[in-house]
Amino acid sequence: MTAAGRGHDEDVWVDDEAGPVVRPYAMTRGRTRPVRGTFDLISMVVATRNPPAADAGPGLEHLPPEQQAIVRRCREPLSVAEISAHLNLPLGTVRVMLGDLLDAGLIRIHDPGPADQPHSRLYEALIDGLRQL
Amino acid sequence: MVYANSDGTDPADPVPTAVKILVAGGFGVGKTTLVTSVSESAPLRTEEVLSSESVGVDDLSGVEAKETTTVAMDFGRITISDSLVLYLFGTPGQDRFRFMWDELALGALGAVVLADTRRLADSWPSIDYFESDGTPFIVAVNCFEGARRYELDEVQLALDLDPEVPVVLCDARQRQSGKDVLIALVQHAHRVRGGGLN
Ligand SMILES: Nc1nc2c(ncn2[C@@H]2O[C@H](COP(=O)(O)OP(=O)(O)O)[C@@H](O)[C@H]2O)c(=O)[nH]1
Ligand SMILES: [Mg+2]
């Protein structure tokens, strides 16, 4: 906060410094844990139905805009980390909103399998895929 | 689990299987560079807001109890096929964020520890971490200009590595080199986890 802020709108004082933390706090109404689900960084999220493009579809318009944005983006499966990156929201905030969406039946979660159970074909597919990049 | 696809994934499910690999090492060693050179788009960034509760009070001694801090992670995506996606996560440099490392390492297929021969000691915390938690890892020596060329077995010795742990050379800026590093890691992880037997 510097003298440069004087005479400007109140917003100036809030946005830059408080923005990244205060806005997500409001989105989750202060909750830090999802009502359901754990949501690994690479859990894949997909919307359970596909409303037509340019239309949030019935049943979505009552949702907070950020939750609508998640459902729209997840017409194609996206990881929890990607949702956080694309919406520029902290992971904790995204997880709380995903919990609400899961609770409402609007998304489906595909958790990653345990990596310590070797499955040769998975490793081979990875190696082949990397070679072909 | 019953798999029907040749890569071990379920063809009936439109949701791909996700796998993650970590890219660790000291500050400025080339983690973000490696993630960028092999991923399919510009690196993505996610952040976690941590309270002192999740970080552990000891680690933030001198910091107000309610204070929060953010830890950012760069990551990238490599779509292997419709049914398989690989994510690469650069580990946050701050080793004190143990909580974040635990979350990252959980379920990881393996880790690449980048090393710069001018400051090998910077790789120790990552190596210690993966050795103790059992995540398969390889060491990739990122060849910066002006650094003396070490023999790979010298590096292995200097880092006090298990002889089984592969040490490879790389240039994190080169896509082909980055791919080779990832392939070496996947092969190593497969070996370590008993692959070839089934
Ligand atoms: N000469 C050279 N420079 C590199 C190489 N890898 C990374 N760099 C540079 O080193 C700096 C730090 O790399 P960065 O990826 O940001 O490191 P990070 O802190 O581990 O994420 C950047 O300026 C890179 O361009 C390399 O293989 N050779
Ligand atoms: Mg970096």
Image (spheres, rainbow, N blue to C red):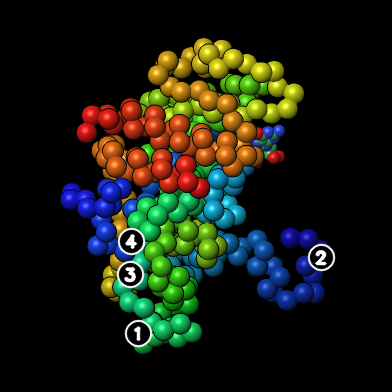
Q: How crowded is mark 2: few (under 14 residues within 10 Å), some or many (20 or more)?
A: few
Return the chain for callout 3. A
* Residue wearing tag 2: A4
Q: Which residue is drawn at 51% across and 35% down?
A: B180
For mark 3, give the secondary structure. strand
Q: Describe residue B180's horizontal placement relative to residue B187 as left or right.
A: right
- Residue A8 screen position, x and y as percent: 77, 74
For mark 4, give the secondary structure. loop
Disc 1 to disc 3, C-alpha distance: 13 Å
Is disc 4 in contact with disc 3, using a CB cutoff of under 8 Å? Answer: no
Q: Mark 2 or mark 1: which comes first in sequence? A: 2
Q: Residues within 10 Å of mark 3 (few under 14, many from 20)?
A: many
- Residue B181 screen position, x and y as percent: 51, 34
* The disc label shown at residue A59, or none: 1
Mark 1 or mark 4, whichever is nearer to me: 4
Residue B149 in sight from this viewpoint: yes
